[in-house]
C-alpha cells in the first residue's frame, strides 16, 4: 500500500469544519470568507472549488445529512442549519443547543441513506438530531447516557445504519463507547481499558479503532466490545489523534499526527490496516510544514487531511489496498457451540493471522482477505473440553 | 503479560540517567548516584557527588563512567567502595535527563554523545582516561542517542539529530551506517531527529522526534515497519521513548507531555512486526522519564518525576524455553510435519504465528519465545489439497 501526494487545496486558513461528500467525490468545507461563514464544495480529483459559496451560520461542525444536504452546528449560536448544496440554499433552524467544541472533528455525523445526522450537544446526555428530509432538528435523549456525559466524538456505522459515539466530558475525553440507532435505542456499550479516554473513532466492517487522549489506540471487535489490540499513537490531550475510515472495500484509516498545544508537528499522515495482527501502518506522507492536522477523510482511493496552521488541505491518492470479503461462520459440534476461531494465511512467510475472534453459539460474520486458501482453526471453549476443527477454506 | 508491581524506590532529586548491568542498577539523580541490587530489590549504596552528573555507563560490573553538563571532566565511580576518580577534561554531554547520552559495554568502554558537533565523549576504564573523538563519518553531524550493542563488547549504536545511525567501536571506527528515509516527501528533504534507540537480536528500533518510529532488520538494514507512534518532540525533551530490550520485548512510552497515566507500552517483536502486548501506567500524574527491561530479574521498570521514583513490574514472559514436539501417523510412526505455534495472549492483542517450522520424522525441540504463555500448536502433514491432515494441542510454556 502506498500513499502519494496529489497536491493542496489552499485558501482554507479560516476554515472551521470539514466533511466528505462521497457521492460526488467532494470534500465540503465550512469556511469564513469576506466576513461570511460559507459552505464550499471542493472536488478531490481536481482540487478545485465546485459551485459558489453558500452563506450559512457561524458553525463549528458539519456532516452530510442527505447526499446533497449539509447539517451544521455551532458553538456560538444554538440555531443549527441545513445547507442544500444543489439548491444552494441555507435553512437556519430553530433554537436547540450548541455544538460541544471548536476546531475538532467528529462532532457531527450523518447517515445519508436514512437522512439523519446526530451531533454532540452541550447539554449532557443529549444529542442534536437532524432530519434531512424534513429540514428539522431536535434535541434528543439517549436513555443509556449518564446525566453527566457528553458526546465527545461520533461516527456513522453505515453497515448497520447506526451511530457510534464516545461519551465523557468535553475536558476529560470519553470513557465509554456507545452505539445507538436512529430511534436513539442503545445497541451496545463498552469501555476502553482504564485510564484511556477515547477522543476519536473510526468504524469499519465490525471494527472500531479509538484514538485516546493518552496516546493509545484501541482496536475493538465492535459486536462484542472485545479489545483486540492496542498501539501507541500521537497523543493530544484535547483532540486525540485524527482518524477517518474509508468507505471502500478495504480496512483503511488515515491518521494525522496531532500534537499538543506546546508541540509543533511535522505533518505526517499514515494509513492503517486494522485487520492485521499487529495493526499495520503503511505509507507515511510528510508534508512541508511543521503543523498539526486536525481533520481528515478518506473516499475510496482519495484521502485528505487539513493542516490547521497553514490552512492547507493535503490531498492524497492511496493504492494497494486489499479486498475483503465477509464470511458467515458457526461452530457446530453438532449443534451450535461457542468457541473461538483463527484464520491463518499460511501461504505467507511468516504466516499471517487474518482474523481471530471469540464465537458465540450463533452465526457470525467475519471479514477476510479475498482470494486466499487459508487454514481455519476452530476451538471449542475451554471448560467444554478442548476440541479442535482444522480445515483449509477458500475466501 | 505484565504482572504486579514488584517494588518501587524513591529517588532523591531528579532522575538524570539509568544504567543496568545484570541485576545491578545505577540511577543518576541530582547530586547523587544511587545503586540498587535488583535481585533483592534493595538499595545498596548512594554516593553523593559535588556536581550533578547526567549520563552514565558501566565500565565493569563495579565501576561506572559518568559525564556532567556542569563540569567537562568526566568521572569514574566505584559502586562498591564509593570512590570517585575525576578524569581529565573531555567535554559535556548534550541533554539534561533525556537518557541514552552514554553507554557502557562493561569491558572498560563508555561512550557518550557530545554537545560539540561531530564529536563523541569517551571514558577508557583501563586508565582510566577521558577523551573526545571525532569520527570522520560524523563530521558536521550531532549525535543525539547512543546505546551499547547488546551481547557484544566494543560496539555502540549512535543516532544523530538528522536521521543517521552509525555502528562504531570505541576507537570511533564506523562499521555500519543506516539513514532513515523520508519518502515520499512533497517538501524539502529533512532528517528525522533520533530521540531513542533499542535493540534486541537482529531488531533495531528507532524513535524519532517527528513521531515516526522505525523497526529495522539490522543485519540487512531493511525496514520491517514504520509507524506513527509518538508526537513530534525536540530531542532535548524527548524523554525516554524506549529503553533496554530483552528477548524480543521492548518498552515504549509517550514521554513528552506531562500528563496523568501516560501509557508505558510493552512490545514483542517475535515474530515480526512488533505487537503491543500490554501496557501499564503511573497513575499519579507523573511524567515518565526513563524506561527499560531487566532480563536478570524479569521486570519492566520506569522512572518518573513528581516525586522522583522508579517502579518495577514483573514480566515473567521475558525468557524463552524449549518444548518438544512430534507427529505420528499412525500412532507409533513418526512423520515429518509442518508446525505452527501461535501464542494466545490472554489480555491485549490477537494471536500471531510465532513459529513456522517443518520438523523431521522424529521428536524435535522447538523454542517457545515467551515464557509462561499459552500456545496453540497446529500440525500439518501430507500434501495440500490432496492428503493434508491436521492436528492441534495447547501447551503452556
Image (cartoon, coloured by chain):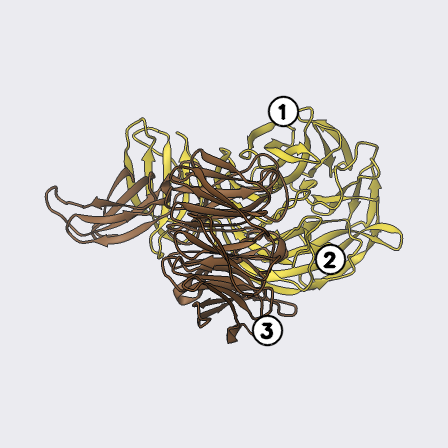
Colour assigned to chain A in the rendering is: yellow
Kindly tell me whether residue A1 is visible in this rendering.
no
The colour applied to the residues of chain B in this rendering is brown
Q: Which mark is residue A144?
A: 1
Discs 3 and 2 carry the same chain letter: no
Q: Is residue A365 left or right of residue B17?
A: left
Q: Which residue is mark 3?
A: B140
Q: CA distance from mark 1 to mark 2?
A: 39 Å
Subunit of label 2: A
Label pair 1/2, CB-CB below 8 angstroms: no
User: How far from the left and from the top, in percent, is residue B92?
Assistant: 59, 62
- Local SS, label 1: loop
Q: Earlier in the sequence, mark 1 or mark 2?
A: 2
Where residue A91 is drawn, which disc sits there? none
Instruction: Report the chain holding disc 3.
Output: B
Task: Give the distance between the C-alpha atoms of the residues marked 1 and 3, in whole angstroms.
Answer: 62 Å
Residue A315 in the figure: left or right of residue B150: right
Residue with the mark numbered 2: A42
Relative to the observer, which residue lies in front, A112 or A343? A343
Q: Are marks 1 and 2 on the same chain?
A: yes
Amino acid at each position: 500500500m502506498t500513499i502519494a501526494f496529489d497536491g493542496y487545496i489552499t485558501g482554507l486558513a479560516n476554515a472551521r469544519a470539514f466533511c466528505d461528500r462521497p457521492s460526488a467525490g467532494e470534500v465540503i468545507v465550512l469556511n469564513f470568507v469576506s466576513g461570511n461563514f460559507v459552505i464550499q464544495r471542493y472536488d478531490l480529483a481536481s482540487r478545485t472549488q465546485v459551485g459558489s459559496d453558500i452563506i450559512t451560520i457561524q458553525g463549528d461542525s458539519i456532516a452530510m445529512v442527505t447526499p446533497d444536504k449539509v447539517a451544521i452546528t455551532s458553538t456560538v449560536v444554538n440555531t443549527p442549519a441545513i445547507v442544500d448544496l444543489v439548491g444552494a440554499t441555507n435553512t437556519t433552524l430553530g433554537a436547540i443547543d450548541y455544538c460541544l467544541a471548536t476546531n475538532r472533528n467528529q462532532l457531527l455525523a450523518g447517515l445519508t441513506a436514512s437522512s439523519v445526522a446526530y451531533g454532540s450537544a452541550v447539554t449532557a446526555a443529549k444529542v442534536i438530531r437532524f432530519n434531512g428530509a424534513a429540514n428539522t432538528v431536535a434535541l434528543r435523549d439517549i436513555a443509556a447516557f449518564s446525566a453527566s456525559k457528553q458526546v465527545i466524538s461520533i461516527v456513522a456505522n453505515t453497515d448497520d445504519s447506526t451511530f457510534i459515539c464516545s461519551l465523557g466530558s468535553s475536558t476529560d475525553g470519553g470513557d465509554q463507547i456507545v452505539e445507538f440507532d436512529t430511534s436513539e435505542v442503545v445497541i451496545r456499550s463498552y469501555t476502553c481499558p482504564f485510564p484511556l479516554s477515547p477522543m476519536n473513532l473510526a468504524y469499519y466492517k465490525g471494527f472500531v479503532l479509538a484514538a485516546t487522549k493518552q496516546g493509545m489506540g484501541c482496536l475493538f471487535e465492535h459486536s462484542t466490545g472485545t479489545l483486540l489490540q492496542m498501539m501507541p499513537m500521537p497523543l493530544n490531550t484535547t483532540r486525540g489523534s485524527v482518524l477517518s475510515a474509508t468507505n471502500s472495500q478495504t480496512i483503511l484509516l488515515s491518521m494525522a499526527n496531532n500534537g499538543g498545544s506546546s508541540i509543533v508537528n511535522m505533518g505526517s499522515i499514515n494509513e492503517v490496516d486494522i485487520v492485521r495482527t499487529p495493526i499495520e501502518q503503511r505509507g507515511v506522507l510528510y508534508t512541508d510544514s511543521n503543523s498539526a492536522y486536525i481533520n481528515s477523510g478518506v473516499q475510496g482511493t482519495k484521502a485528505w487531511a487539513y493542516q490547521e496552521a497553514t490552512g492547507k488541505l493535503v490531498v492524497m491518492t492511496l493504492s494497494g489496498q486489499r479486498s475483503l470479503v465477509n464470511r458467515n461462520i458457526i461452530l457446530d459440534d453438532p449443534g451450535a457451540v461457542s468457541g473461538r476461531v483463527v484464520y491463518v494465511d499460511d501461504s505467507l512467510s511468516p504466516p499471517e493471522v487474518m482474523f481471530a475472534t471469540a464465537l458465540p453459539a450463533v452465526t457470525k460474520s467475519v471479514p477476510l482477505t479475498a482470494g486466499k486458501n487459508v487454514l481455519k482453526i476452530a476451538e471449542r471453549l475451554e471448560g467444554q473440553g478442548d476440541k479442535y476443527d482444522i480445515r483449509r477454506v477458500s475466501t | 503479560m505484565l504482572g504486579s508491581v514488584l517494588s518501587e524506590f524513591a529517588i532523591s532529586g531528579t532522575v538524570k540517567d539509568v544504567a543496568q548491568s545484570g541485576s545491578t542498577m545505577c540511577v543518576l539523580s541530582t547530586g547523587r548516584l544511587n545503586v540498587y541490587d535488583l535481585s533483592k530489590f534493595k538499595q545498596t549504596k548512594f554516593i553523593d557527588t559535588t556536581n550533578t552528573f547526567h549520563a552514565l555507563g558501566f565500565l565493569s560490573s563495579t565501576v561506572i563512567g559518568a559525564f556532567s553538563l556542569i563540569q567537562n571532566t568526566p568521572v569514574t565511580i566505584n559502586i562498591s567502595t564509593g570512590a570517585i576518580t575525576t578524569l581529565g577534561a573531555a567535554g559535556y554531554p548534550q541533554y539534561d535527563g533525556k537518557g541514552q547520552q552514554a553507554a557502557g559495554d562493561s569491558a572498560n568502554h563508555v561512550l557518550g554523545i557530545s554537545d560539540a558537533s561531530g564529536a563523541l565523549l569517551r571514558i577508557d576504564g583501563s586508565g582510566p582516561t577521558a577523551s573526545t573523538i571525532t569520527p570522520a563519518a560524523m563530521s558536521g553531524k550531532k549525535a543525539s542517542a547512543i546505546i551499547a550493542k547488546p551481547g557484544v563488547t566494543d560496539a555502540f549504536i549512535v543516532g544523530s539529530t538528522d536521521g543517521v545511525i552509525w555502528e562504531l567501536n570505541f576507537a570511533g571506527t564506523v562499521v555500519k551506517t543506516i539513514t532513515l528515509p523520508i519518502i515520499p516527501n512533497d517538501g524539502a528533504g529533512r532528517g528525522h531527529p533520533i530521540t531513542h534507540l533499542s535493540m534486541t537480536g537482529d531488531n533495531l528500533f528507532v524513535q524519532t522526534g517527528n513521531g515516526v518510529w522505525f523497526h529495522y532488520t539490522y543485519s540487512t538494514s531493511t525496514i520491517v515497519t514504520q509507524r506513527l507512534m509518538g508526537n513530534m518532540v525536540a530531542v532535548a525533551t524527548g524523554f525516554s521513548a524506549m529503553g533496554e530490550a530483552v528477548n524480543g520485548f521492548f518498552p515504549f512510552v509517550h514521554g513528552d507531555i506531562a500528563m496523568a497515566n501516560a501509557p508505558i507500552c510493552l512490545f514483542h517483536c517475535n515474530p515480526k512486526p512488533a505487537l503491543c502486548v500490554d501496557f501499564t501506567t503511573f497513575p499519579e500524574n507523573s511524567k515518565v522519564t526513563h524506561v527499560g527491561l531487566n532480563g536478570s530479574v524479569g521486570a519492566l521498570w520506569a522512572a518518573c518525576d513528581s516525586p522522583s521514583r522508579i517502579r518495577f513490574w514483573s514480566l515473567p514472559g521475558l525468557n524463552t524455553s524449549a518444548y518438544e514436539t512430534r507427529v505420528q501417523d499412525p500412532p507409533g510412526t513418526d512423520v515429518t510435519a509442518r508446525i505452527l505455534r501461535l501464542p494466545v495472549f490472554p489480555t491485549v492483542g490477537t494471536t500471531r504465528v510465532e513459529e513456522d517450522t517443518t520438523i523431521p520424522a522424529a521428536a524435535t525441540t522447538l523454542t517457545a519465545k515467551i515464557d509462561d504463555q499459552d500456545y496453540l500448536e497446529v500440525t500439518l502433514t501430507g500434501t495440500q489439497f490432496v492428503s493434508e491432515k491436521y492436528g492441534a494441542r495447547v501447551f503452556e510454556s
